[in-house]
């Protein structure tokens, strides 16, 4: 058992918990931030992605002690009140989600990607989003949403051919 | 009262942003695992590590002694409950009794043996490790063809031939067709076992209120109403004391079109312990114990004339059922047989299905459920035939399509295809890729020693499943539309939206019909206490049947609205346009909100009219719908590595009238991704002893962003005459068209090397071996 302190969605928080507990569980169960999703528990699907000091990390394989002293952002902390983050807005505008289960992780991964590379090429977006699994959308719309969030006209648009 | 009419714009046909999205993109949606109940316990399921074994004893003492453990239940505790239901019926079908927990034997790796209940998840899982099961392993069989061989281990000892059923369907006379043919082409074609892998695993929360003798089950399900009926039967409780809620559901693809042991088990646990209980499947459990899909071995013969006219098709279909029948397990291959004619005119079919038990988790519906298998088989064998006759694969398809003037077209398997223009999507797809130019490029590539392939697949689907006589539990769908006293509209639909966007598309339909704002409509679904009985979302049925039920309910309401409008305007000639009742003579009008208020206040009522504005419609469809389309895939194979690069992917679909193009294209994209997964990457592999080798995401290749091509989509629109919306369904189309188009393309690329067929998945290793001249 250890007392761990960190900043969660801009607020100072602390928790007494075994340090090897997955960050995913602490965020969901202790802080009730259920926008963080369990998908596989082995870092393979990235539905559990959160930002740790601005970098996307799979919270299911991150021991909570590794996040101690750091700043964590979950999907709940991304929007500013009613105002959506541009990446959230872009996902809705492009129709880049269906069941929505992978979506918080997708949006946070994209946010970190654009923070690091504000004007990514399509190849950089595909590579940057490659760890996050989506079983519904087949990715074209997700890539387009990231392009839109970067301020680019999405290249992968519907109906550029055939409609 | 006003006199001006607002100009209304039709929302149907537009890419309206989804109403579901705000809660999903902010992380505020509630999936099963997000539900917390006061005093809730957590359950872990002890599962068999063996594919086939006798259980000589189960010792739960060590588990029960762990602090924090509430209870441990084993097979003997639930011996009187059940069975886990099979909804399908076929003549002579052998149905093993599917207990909630294994009794004296386990039949597959992952088979539930015990349930441990504890104060938290960690303790439950630790305690599950302490349950000691004394197994005596026996021989297992995991390959369906080996299971049919004499002397194979019997999955269920009472049926040593491992045959759950044989099913035959004949149309015309295939033997005669084969005698009349110039050529008969034969090929063994497989559709491998797949893992559906919805991103949200299954999960259940159960809560028992002893005072009311009322059980609530929250489950990630596509069919909450059917689950309620069936779980009540399993547990022996009254259906009206069971509430099933399917909250936000994170993908299903058929894997949640089921009733599993765990739903009933958690109900049982909640009743026994008097406390709420939660069970969330781990991903490992999801791979082991949630239904798989496909599992076909097909032996095909196609008979044709020299000019390419197809005369008939024969099929021996060996279906790997797994160890048990889940809800629809034996029915899935019968859908394959129904769709064997594809889009073609031939009249002679001979099909035999052998349904085979194996020591594997059951197969059941997975996106397309029988139709991808059928389409893959027929579109591959048609390409084999084209190659044999040295015909162009597009030409042979045009030659055999059902003609436009033949609809409704009665197929050799007894279906009535509703409407079609089968050449149109293929023509459009050929045009999009500049087909003849593309063939020239291919000739140049080949001359340069490159392996370039062009693959064509056309497909027909059986959707809007389906008329009640064709389904085990009713094929209709229901809708209630309520106009609240303020004029706001509440829709309650019997479907269960889980990513398909019907909260949006249904609102588009209602907004157009009632002239109200999208934001003034709320669509509720998935709660059996809130919503009238319904069937659910699967088989590309939600919009075609559920949307139609909604449409008719709205029509009933409009008639009542006009009666109130006539009374309020003191006119016998009123129209309801743009959300207002208008007197056609004076031009005076009242708003829907004013009508709604008056109908609830009921100071006066039109003659013979009740207060309120509510209408419910249960709609029985007169037929299935039959969408169709064409995919073209251009590939290049790397001689050195066997790697496949997709250079063009064109999908042209005809799903009838389109309500929301953005949502339709999203369904195509996702469908293609799953088809591509099957064609190139995915395969559930059991070893000889019955261990699932591909038991985790590290070993099972779900497509990632870098593995997807850019998909060019197009549409033709042939409305369905089956429903007034003209819609056909699109949820499964992408998957159905994809795998044969990809495989046809790669076979075409390798055809200069003499390759005629390759079974999926087309792994680089398999392709490289073929290029080296070996057998794949």
Image (tube, rainbow, N blue to C red):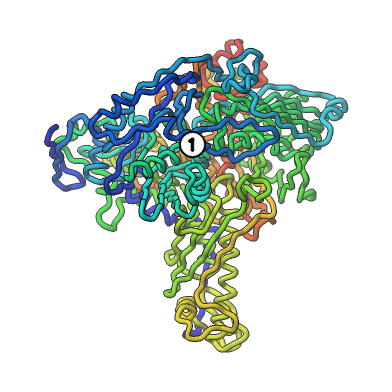
Quarter where residue B555 is shown: bottom right
For the point 55% across and 64% down, the residue is: B616
Res. A75 in view: yes
Quadrant that contains the C terminus of chain B: top right
Q: Is residue B609 left or right of residue B299?
A: left
Q: Is residue B521 above or below residue B436?
A: below
Q: Position of residue B28 (x, y in %)?
A: 32, 51
Q: Nearer the viewer, residue B223 or B17?
A: B223
Residue at 55 percent of width and 34 percent of height: B675
Residue B478 versus residue A150 in the image, above or below: below
- Residue B648 seen from this side: no
In x, y percent, where is residue A4?
13, 36
Residue B214 left/right relative to B370: left
Residue at (55%, 85%) from the top-left corner?
B567
Identify the residue position indicated by label 1 in the image: B80
Subunit of label 1: B
Viewer-closest of A64 and B70: B70
Q: Residue at x 73, y 24 (%)?
A: B387
> Which one is nearer the viewer's eye here, B319 or B211?
B211
Residue B434 image offset from top left, x and y in percent: 64, 38
């Amino acid at each position: 058992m250890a007392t761990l302190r960190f900043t969660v969605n801009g607020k100072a928080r602390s928790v007494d918990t075994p340090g090897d507990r997955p960050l995913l569980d602490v965020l969901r169960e202790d802080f009730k931030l259920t926008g963080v999703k369990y998908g596989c528990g082995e870092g393979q699907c990235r539905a559990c992605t959160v930002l740790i000091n601005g970098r996307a990390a799979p919270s299911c394989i991150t021991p909570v002690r590794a996040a101690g002293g750091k700043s964590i952002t979950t999907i709940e902390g991304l929007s500013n009140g009613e105002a959506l983050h541009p990446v959230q807005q872009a996902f809705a505008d492009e129709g880049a989600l269906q069941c929505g289960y992978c979506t918080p992780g997708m949006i946070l991964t994209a946010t970190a990607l654009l923070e690091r590379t504000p004007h990514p090429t399509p190849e950089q977006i595909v590579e940057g989003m490659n760890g996050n699994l989506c079983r519904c959308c087949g990715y074209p719309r997700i890539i387009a949403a990231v392009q839109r969030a970067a301020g680019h006209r999405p290249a992968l648009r519907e109906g550029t051919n055939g409609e | 009262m006003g006199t001006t009419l607002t100009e209304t714009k039709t929302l149907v046909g537009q890419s309206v942003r989804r109403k579901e999205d705000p809660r999903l993109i902010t992380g505020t949606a509630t999936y099963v695992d997000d539900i917390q109940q006061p005093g809730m316990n957590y359950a872990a399921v002890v599962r068999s590590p063996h594919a086939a074994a006798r259980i000589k004893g189960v010792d739960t003492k060590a588990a029960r002694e762990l602090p924090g453990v509430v209870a441990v239940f084993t097979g003997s505790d639930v011996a009187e409950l059940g069975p886990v239901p099979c909804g399908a019926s076929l003549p002579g079908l052998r149905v093993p009794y599917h207990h909630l927990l294994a009794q004296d034997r386990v039949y597959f790796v992952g088979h539930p043996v015990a349930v441990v209940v504890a104060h938290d998840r960690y303790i439950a899982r630790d305690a599950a490790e302490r349950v000691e099961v004394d197994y005596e392993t026996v021989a297992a069989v995991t390959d369906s063809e080996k299971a049919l061989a004499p002397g194979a281990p019997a999955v269920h000892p009472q049926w040593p031939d491992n045959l759950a059923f044989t099913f035959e369907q004949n149309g015309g006379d295939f033997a005669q067709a084969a005698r009349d043919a110039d050529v008969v082409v034969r090929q063994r074609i497989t559709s491998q076992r797949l893992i559906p892998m919805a991103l949200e695993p299954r999960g259940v929360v159960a809560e028992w209120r002893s005072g009311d003798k009322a059980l609530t089950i929250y489950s990630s399900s596509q069919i909450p109403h059917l689950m309620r009926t069936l779980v009540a039967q399993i547990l022996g409780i009254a259906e009206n004391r069971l509430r099933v809620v399917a909250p936000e559901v994170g993908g299903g693809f058929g894997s949640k079109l089921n009733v599993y042991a765990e739903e009933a088990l958690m109900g049982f646990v909640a009743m026994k312990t008097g406390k709420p209980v939660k069970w969330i499947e781990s991903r490992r459990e999801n791979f082991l114990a949630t239904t798989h899909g496909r599992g076909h071995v097909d032996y095909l013969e196609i008979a044709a004339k020299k000019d390419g006219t197809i005369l008939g098709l024969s099929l021996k279909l060996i279906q790997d059922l797994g160890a048990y029948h889940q809800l629809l397990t034996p029915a899935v291959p019968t859908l394959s047989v129904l769709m064997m004619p594809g889009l073609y005119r031939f009249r002679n079919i001979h099909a035999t299905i052998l349904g085979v038990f194996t020591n594997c988790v059951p197969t059941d519906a997975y996106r397309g459920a029988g139709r991808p298998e059928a389409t893959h088989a027929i579109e591959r064998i048609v390409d084999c035939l084209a190659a044999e006759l040295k015909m162009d694969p597009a030409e042979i398809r045009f030659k055999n399509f059902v003609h436009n003037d033949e609809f409704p077209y009665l197929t050799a398997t007894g279906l009535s295809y509703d409407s079609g223009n089968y050449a149109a999507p293929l023509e459009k797809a050929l045009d999009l890729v500049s087909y003849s130019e593309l063939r020239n490029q291919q000739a140049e590539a080949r001359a340069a020693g490159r392996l370039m392939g062009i693959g064509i697949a056309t497909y027909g689907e059986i959707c809007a499943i389906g008329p009640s006589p064709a389904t085990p539990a009713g094929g209709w769908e229901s809708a209630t539309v309520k106009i609240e006293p303020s004029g706001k509209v509440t829709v309650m639909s019997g479907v269960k939206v889980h990513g398909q966007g019907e909260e949006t598309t249904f609102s588009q339909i209602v907004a157009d019909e009632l002239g109200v704002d999208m934001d003034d409509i709320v669509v509720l679904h998935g709660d059996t206490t809130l919503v009238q009985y319904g069937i659910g979302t699967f088989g590309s049925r939600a919009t075609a049947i559920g949307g139609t039920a909604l449409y008719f309910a709205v029509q009933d309401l409009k008639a009542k609205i006009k009666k109130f409008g006539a009374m309020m305007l003191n006119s016998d000639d009123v129209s309801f346009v743009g959300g207002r009742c208008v007197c056609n003579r004076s031009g005076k009008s009242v708003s829907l909100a004013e009508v709604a208020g008056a109908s609830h206040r009921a100071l006066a009522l039109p003659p013979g009219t009740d207060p309120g504005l509510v209408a419910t419609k249960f709609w029985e469809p007169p037929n299935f719908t039959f969408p169709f389309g064409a995919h073209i895939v251009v590939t290049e194979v790397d001689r050195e590595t066997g790697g496949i690069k997709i250079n063009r992917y064109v999908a042209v679909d005809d799903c009838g009238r389109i309500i929301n193009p953005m949502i339709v294209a999203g369904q195509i994209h996702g469908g293609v991704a799953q088809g591509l997964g099957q064609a190139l990457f995915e395969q559930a592999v059991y070893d000889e002893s019955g261990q699932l080798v591909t038991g985790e995401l590290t070993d099972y290749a779900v497509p990632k962003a870098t593995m997807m091509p850019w998909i060019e989509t197009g549409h033709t629109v042939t409305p369905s005459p089956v429903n007034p919306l003209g819609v056909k369904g699109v949820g499964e189309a992408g998957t159905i068209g994809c795998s044969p188009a990809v495989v046809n393309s790669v076979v075409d690329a390798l055809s200069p090397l003499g390759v005629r067929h390759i079974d999926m998945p087309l792994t680089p290793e398999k392709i490289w071996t073929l290029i080296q001249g070996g057998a794949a």
